[in-house]
Image: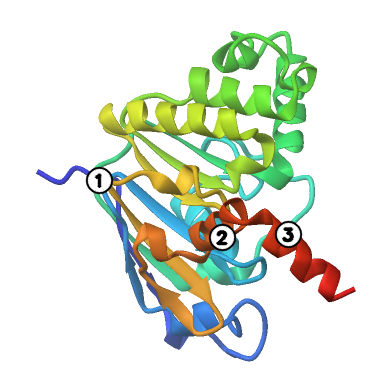
Amino acid sequence: MNNQFLKHVDFLRDKVNSHDCYPYNLPAVRALQRLDFHPKITYFVGENGSGKSTLLEAIAVAFGFNPEGGTRNFTFNTRTSHSSLADHIRLAKGFRPRTGFFLRAESFFNLATEIENLDEDEDGGPPVIDFYGGVSLHEQSHGESFMALLTHKFGGKGLYILDEPESALSPQRQLAALFRIHDLVEAGSQFLIATHSPILLAYPESTIYQFSDTGIETPAYENTETYQVMKAFINDPQKMLRFMQGNN
């Protein structure tokens, strides 16, 4: 039996007043009709500005997560920066997840600050940081704090929406994160991940959506631009360096 938490997203095209302004003028959004989610992991890949993070954020907000990240219980607002796309999509939901989290790499600092602010309230119950490993996220490196989140806060039967989590992680830590993601998938969790990392993208039981100027495609892992560019560089870095020197 399929027990996934999110089944698909529909773009409510008829509710948009104008398709000539951001984010509705993005080719990927223009091409969007319905995206089906894999019960384990769904990836969004593509160049910066392609719309992958914009759609991922809209899905998170439409599900009830705070736009700046965290669980559905977080309500802080440092700066309103999310688009109106969340108002023009419809999510097909399945079972209710036991837990969940929305990670935005660019606002993770704000999330760590909010946790400290909450723990300053002496009448607020057990320290919130205890659910994140007990050590202030500000007192760890960005990578260490993300791994603490992944290890201590994330659990089974959860819905986790991650926007470019690799920005904090070395290649070794990306591999460790992928192993932890696998453990959580095996424990019944579902992930939506926007990434530039060929390591994080390598999970075999998944669906990949590639966002580009021509719309949205579903390539095999080895056919994604993320994989091909990295492979070409690693196989012959001198060729890339010669190309750079020839264009100076």
The relative height of residue 207 versus residue 158 in the rendered view (above or below) is below
Query: Foreground: 244 or 221?
Result: 244
Residue that mark 3 sits on: 81
Instruction: Name the quadrant of the C terminus.
Output: bottom right
Please, what secondary structure does the residue beneath circle 1 have? Answer: loop
Q: Judge depth for marks 2 and 3 and give the one in front.
A: 2
Residue that mark 1 sits on: 4
Query: Foreground: 129 or 180?
Result: 180
Relative horizontal placement of residue 7, taking residue 177 as reference (left or right): left
Position in image of residue 82 (x %, y %):
67, 61
Task: Identify which amino acid the numbered label 3 is placed on.
Answer: Ser
Instruction: Name the quadrant of the N terminus.
Output: top left
Please, what secondary structure does the residue beneath circle 3 have? Answer: loop
Residue that mark 2 sits on: 232
Whichever of callouts 3 and 1 sits on the residue coming sooner in the sequence is 1
Query: Foreground: 198 or 139?
Result: 198
Please, what secondary structure does the residue beneath circle 2 have? Answer: helix
Position in image of residue 116 (x %, y %):
75, 20
The answer to whether residue 76 is visible is no
For the residues labelled 2 and 1, the Cα–Cα distance comes to: 36 Å
